[in-house]
Image: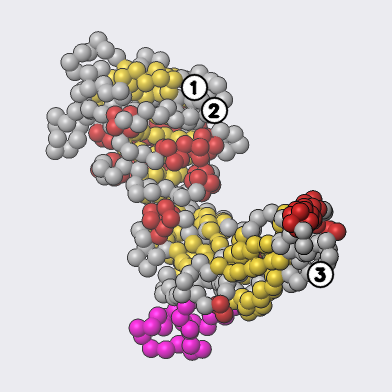
Amino acid sequence: MHPFKTFWGRWAAIAAFLMALLFACTTNRTTKPGGNLPPETHLSLFFSDTLQLPGESTSMQVLHWYGDDPDGEVIGYEYRWSYEAESLWHFTIDVSDTFLVPIRVPHDTFSFAIRALDNDSLRDPTPAHLSFPVMNSPPKVKFPVDFVNNYSRNVYNCFSYFSIGWVGSDPDGQATITGYDYFLADTSAMPIDSIVHLPATPTTPPHDSIYWKVEFLNPANWVHLDSLRVLKVFTDLQPGKHRFFLRCHDVASAYSNIIYYPDTSGVWNSMPVVGTALFIDDDRYASEIDKDIDTSLAHIYGPGNYSTWVAIDRLSYYPRDIEETLKLFDVVVWHGGSYPHFKEAADAITKYIAPPSNGHLLAFSTHRYEGDTIIYPFLPIDTVTTARIGRSFKITRTPVAPSGYPDTLASNVPGFPSYPLSKSFGFKPGSPTGLMPGTVQALYIQSPDNNPAHVDTVAAKYPATGEAKVVYFSMELYLCSARFGELMNYVIQEEFGDAGR
């Protein structure tokens, strides 16, 4: 063949190949033989616990997926669960999610399907599927931690009003909790753990046989509360020692462990309401004054005709309990001492004094001396003028105070003739901020021994005229035992009017 023809023939073949290649690169995919290809979907299940086997799934499932498209781009996914309508698919751009399947029976099987969607709106015609058995998880219930720490392992006394709350949870979701059951028993019964399979009849000790009684095991004796009730309020507790049992249950009829208050080392005692006056002992260190207060109240109301609430370690956990307890009485004598529970009880005391309760409060404390700077809304204090007045041996009635008050109250502790008043704080009288505005009357003043010219108010009443609602002393009134009874008698029977008689 002629060399010239051979040369040009080769170039023609090369040109034809290049043209064909260019045509192939610029032609749309949809026009090629076979058309556009749909995407493919891949699905996997994540186990949070490496020891968990596939046959031991819980209601919470963590699923991962991804898609690929051989001739395009995956723009999202559509998924559905077996318990949903076949036509209901949910769109997402995520590649993983955590699901909580709605288990309603002890054991069930759920299936999950997902399909990829590409940029040409083509869906994977064979969605990825995954089926797994699910076992219902029992719910849990507990009391607040600070309630357990401060109330469950000690002695707690209340009157007829008592509240107790709890927190329920379920690994399968809060919505699966269907309710709570409680049982109120006396402390002759021993607590049990519901994990233990109780026999049908009592057995011999030491297996808590004292509490394996028909009365307790009988489901009829459990009181049911709906799932929204997380607080039980007893308004008419009978006197005696009690124990409160509680359990939770879910839609699959699974029960939580039984919890109880108080703990085996604690005591919960309901006291009877006696009389119309309440003495609150809130001072850990001055026990001698308790005798003087008891003597004075017995003289006014008669022996045993008033109530006593020892609040040295704790008041009620729930403020409403304090308020409702105070409202059971017309007169409250609160011996606060250096560390009174005024902060926890401030709102309750204020409501007790204000209408419509219209209670009457005689209180004495030295909390400012110990660094408590709060001016409580029920006290007749405008400002604190002197945080620590200093040593002195008596307080003196003001000229404007009613003549029924003793002229002086002097320190005369038996066995300690030179024991001074040293924790008093002075204040400027003012209308209690939490009560209706009104005039306040200063009752007693105190001066330090080293500066008699310095005078501070240490006692006041509100209101200044008419029936008193609050009479307050900011000094160690318990050291003035000689005329303490006379003072108590006048405040309760004269200042508090008919309520104190």
Q: Identify which residue is drawn at 42% across, 63% down.
A: 262
Residue 435 numbered tag = 2
CB atoms at circles 3 and 2 under 8 Å apart? no
Residue 385 percent location from the top left of the image: 34, 18
Secondary structure under the numbered disc 2 in the rendered image: loop
Q: Is residue 360 above or below residue 178?
A: above
Between 45 and 71, the one lying in front of the other is 71
- For badge 1, the amino acid type reads Ser
* Residue named by callout 1: 431
Residue 462 percent location from the top left of the image: 48, 25
Q: Residue furthest front?
A: 2
Q: CA distance from mark 1 to mark 2?
A: 8 Å
Q: Identify which residue is drawn at 55% across, 67% down.
A: 46
> Badge 2 local density, few (<14 within 10 Å), some, or many (20+)?
some
> Badge 1 local density, few (<14 within 10 Å), some, or many (20+)?
many
CB atoms at circles 1 and 2 under 8 Å apart? yes
Task: Inspect the magenta stretch and tell me whether residue 179 lies in it.
Answer: no
Can residue 14 be seen?
Answer: no
Magenta-colored span = 195-219
Secondary structure under the numbered disc 3 in the rendered image: loop
Between 263 and 302, the one lying in front of the other is 263
Residue 66 percent location from the top left of the image: 64, 62
Nearest to viewer (mark 1 / mark 3)? 3
- For badge 3, the amino acid type reads Glu
Q: Earlier in the sequence, mark 3 or mark 2?
A: 3
Task: Inspect the magenta stretch and tell me whether residue 203 lies in it.
Answer: yes
Residue 438 percent location from the top left of the image: 53, 20
Image check: 140 left or right of 3?
A: left
* Residue named by callout 3: 86
